[in-house]
Amino acid sequence: MSNVPKLRFKEFNGAWAVAPLSKVADINPKSGELPDNFIYIDLESVKSGMMVKRELVAKDNAPSRAQRLLKNDDILFQMVRPYQRNNFHFKLGNGYVASTGYAQIRSNGCSYFLFQKLLTNRFVSDVLVRCTGTSYPAINSNDLSSIDVAYPCLTEQQKIADFLTDIDTKIEQLTRKEELLKQYKKGVMQKIFSQEIRFKAGDGSEFPDWKEKKLGDLCEITTGKLDANAMVDSGQYRFYTCAKEYYNIDDYAFDTDALIVSGNGANVGYIHHYQGKFNAYQRTYVLDSFTDNIIFVKFVLDEYLHKRIMKEKNEGNTPYIVMGTLTDMKINLPSFSEQTKIANFLSSIDNKIEQVGKQLDESKQFKKALLQQMFV
């Protein structure tokens, strides 16, 4: 394979050099004395390259794996398969210690260039084939150190790093915006359903008081009839199982405006809204023929159904839904007009979240394409 990238800044040319990772970085450099108290970075502290959890621990009570004292520009590389893209470029200053579940990589050149290099398909593939073990396959430090890395001169490394930093900044901003919108929606839903926030009619008058009803009195509730493996790749109708995504099938059993609720499994209580022809798995509940605003009811169920499922769950049992979970569930309902206003308001927030999520996905895909073309 040529050691010249497909996409390159015009002022650079020639092949990139190649050397084992151990020649371009120090792998697990010897740590100094750990501070008496520090922020511990374990394997759950990092998600998608961002710090999501900070745990302050005392050295005397620290986990045995807390051994890697960090310096700015260190790279934390996940050793366990298949998490080799869940890495972290550290720039948080003093007082942080990482788990030995990470390889600590200290670059001899441009740290951020090397960090991006370690995210490429080529490097990750080289790691995955070297992972050993059964329960938690992982790569050891010696095998990681031996993987060849292609790299240009330091000036080109820095230019690539600066360019990708701009893209990462946009991804971080979109990620934060999406998270803030989700937090805002969660907060405003709680205030709406507790009636701390009330909407008013078009003429400024108050809507009537809310009334409590059972979900079974608001709609018809049935289940699908099919096995989960009834899906057909080229089928023209949607087939809903207990997964978050839908599949396809050749025939339909429902032609309606419905909420489709996962009845068991990892996604128990997950709710789809669909209007049209579809079919469903036998452990999936289909709610239709609503007397009230179906979108409003979906928002209520999004907020409260999982709590009800977990409350009914017996100790040690996998949570699941029985018919009574849904039919007997009590819901506070405003007038239909207020339901519509609430549904429209919350749907507008969902639309914003969806738009930001689409921009985020596009940015991630753009960066992924760049990584494959700008690196060797």
Image: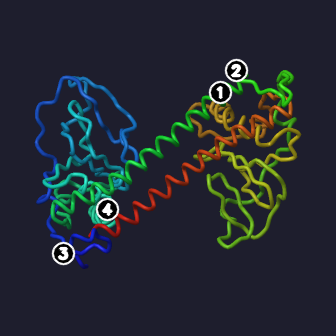
Q: Is residue 319 above or below residue 35?
A: below
Residue matched to label 1: 190
How many discs appear? Answer: 4
Q: Are marks 2 and 1 in contact (CB under 8 Å)?
A: yes
Q: Position of residue 178 (x, y in %)?
A: 52, 43
Label drawn at residue 15 = 3
Crowding near pointer 1: few (<14 within 10 Å), some, many (20+)?
A: some
Crowding near pointer 3: few (<14 within 10 Å), some, many (20+)?
A: some
Q: As drawn, is 283 to the left or to the right of 38?
A: right
Q: Amino acid at mark 4?
A: Val
Q: As drawn, is 178 to the left or to the right of 39?
A: right
Q: As drawn, is 352 to the left or to the right of 360?
A: right
Alpha-carbon distance for marks 2 and 3?
Answer: 65 Å
Residue matched to label 2: 196
Q: Are marks 1 and 3 in contact (CB under 8 Å)?
A: no
Q: Amino acid at mark 2?
A: Glu
Q: Is residue 97 above or below residue 103?
A: above
Q: Are marks 1 and 4 in contact (CB under 8 Å)?
A: no
Residue matched to label 4: 124
Q: Position of residue 247 (x, y in %)?
A: 66, 62
Q: Amino acid at mark 3?
A: Ala
Q: Which of disc 3 and disc 4 is earlier in sequence? A: 3
Q: Which of disc 4 and disc 2 is earlier in sequence? A: 4
